Amino acid sequence: NQTADALVKAATSSASPAIKAVAWDVKAKIAVAAEEWNVAGQSIERSLSTLSRTDSPCAAWKIHDTASAYHQHSGDLEKAEQHRSESQDAILAMVRSFPVGHPLRNSLLAEEPIRKILGDEASSRYLHAE
């Protein structure tokens, strides 16, 4: 996809590994939607490799969620679960960065993608406790 390639090219000029990793993640999502599984797998690997050079839970949860979905589709349930767990860990790092009751913490936990990854019960639990 030319648009995804242009995004990755623009992002590689950035000094931020998180921006580069997210660009590769977007390319992977576009490839998944187009059922271009080889491109999706390569893009996910590039995204994860780039992500490993930074500590960015805001990027990590999304990237690991994409990787989990990809591996779920490809039948590698062990890798899918590993990435789902890493996505959860990144989300909880963001959640715990706000005190209980903080509006941003509550807003984050109310988001559908977050609730899908954590589960509704866990999302509710973290609204009221560490």
Image (tube, rainbow, N blue to C red):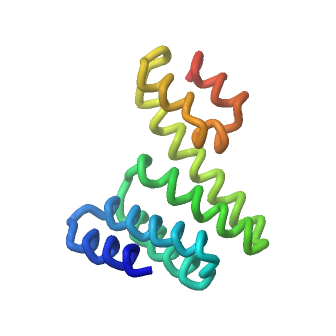
Q: In the image, is 23 to the left or to the right of 101?
A: left
Q: Nearer the viewer, residue 52 or 66?
A: 66
Residue at 65% from the left image edge and 54% from the top image edge: 84
Quarter of the picture holding the N terminus: bottom left
Residue 105 image offset from top left, x and y in percent:
47, 25
Residue 122 image offset from top left, x and y in percent:
68, 30
Furthest residue in direction bottom, as rendered: 38
Q: Is residue 35 above or below residue 66?
A: below
Q: How many numbered circles are shown? A: 0
Q: Nearer the viewer, residue 19 or 125?
A: 19
Residue at 55% from the left image edge and 75% from the top image edge: 31
Residue 85 image offset from top left, x and y in percent:
64, 51
Q: In the image, is 6 to the left or to the right of 112?
A: left
Q: In the image, is 101 to the left or to the right of 34?
A: left
Quarter of the picture holding the C terminus: top right
Residue 37 location, quadrant: bottom right
Residue at 66% from the left image edge and 23% from the top image edge: 125
Residue at 65% from the left image edge and 61% from the top image edge: 68
Q: Is residue 115 above or below residue 39?
A: above
Residue 102 image offset from top left, x and y in percent:
43, 18
